[in-house]
Amino acid sequence: MKAGPRFTFIEALTGFRLTSRHFKPDANYVVMDSYWDESGTHGEGSPAVIMAGFGATAAQWVGFEKRLTRLFADYGVKTFHAKDLRGTKGDFRGWDMEKKGRFNSRFLRIIDEQLSFGVATVVAPEDYKAHYGQKPFPRKARKDSQYGLLFRIALGRSIMFMRERPRSDWPLNVVLECGHPNAGDALRIFGEVKAIPRNTAILGRISFDTKQGCLPLAVADSLAYAMFRTVGGYVGHPTDPDAVPVGPSDPPYYTHKVPTRCVQIREKALRALDRDHRQVAGKAGRR
């Protein structure tokens, strides 16, 4: 008799692993594209809001899309939403744990073998409100929404990655999922950051797309949702604080090749941002 799926507690928490190492030079790096998504920004009472995604060269993304298209075709998936996979909804309706595990294992391996770096930014809404959002602002200062703040820090972290690359690898293009009410914040912040002389050559363009029309946003969605559930305390690895579980995987697999950094935005950073905005407003007022 064929045995059913066997998932230990550790195996059921397979997913992403955060790292502190930098990604290694590769002679094939020419122009980077990064795809980001958010989680936890659409409702009151959320324990955390997240922006996360991955970067790679255009050639790497082509390989990623070919392999992901094949995976989706094998399983009849048209549109990927990490929340649907976990809740067995949408294109994942009717899947058992064994099928989810096989899909997840291939999905994670494709990410690990095709992409260059990952980044995630996290802020607790209570911290945002207390140390930045609810504080009175100078008239000429533009306050970042939670979405905008996460984007600003993710962009800064990505620029740090890019500075480790030779100039021939520049610029970095950014793609976000369209439809968020604060998407305008991302456009403004991207323009502000790119206007800084030392960043002008590093950054290329910013654009928006849908998960239906842009496969790379699927992996951004997966990391963002996994980070939300981990930071929110809904799930966690029992021994590894750098593990970000995504669900069952058969065979078990954690990403370990693609370096992924998580930036927790706490009180000190929020106070610094508030101070910086006041200084900018002060200079504008003296002109």
Image: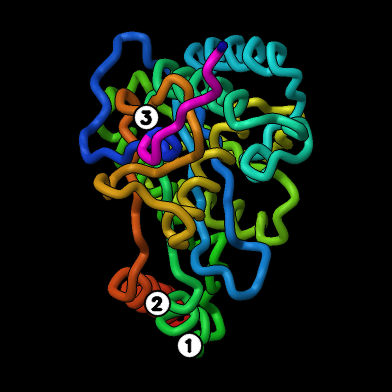
Distance from disc 3 to disc 1, alpha carbons, whole Å, reads 41 Å
Q: Secondary structure at mark 1?
A: loop
Depth check: 132 or 3 in front?
A: 3
- Dominant secondary-structure state across the stretch colored magenta: loop
Whether residue 38 appears in magenta in the rendering, the answer is: no
Q: Secondary structure at mark 3?
A: loop
Q: Nearer the viewer, mark 3 or mark 1?
A: 3
- The image shows residue 77 at horizontal and vertical percentages of 73, 23
Three-letter residue code for mark 1: Lys
Q: Is residue 191 visible?
A: yes
Left-right relation of 126 to 242? right
10 Å crowding of disc 2: few (<14), some (14-19), many (20+): some
The residue to which callout 1 is attached is 135
Q: Which residues are magenta?
A: 2-10
Please say if the residues under marks 1 and 2 sit with CB atoms less than 8 Å apart: yes
Asked whether residue 32 appears in the rendered view, the answer is no
Residue 254 marker: 3
Amino acid at dot 3: Tyr
> Left of 55 or right of it: where is 27?
left
Residue that appears at 58% across and 40% down: 221
> Which residue is labeled 2 in the image?
274
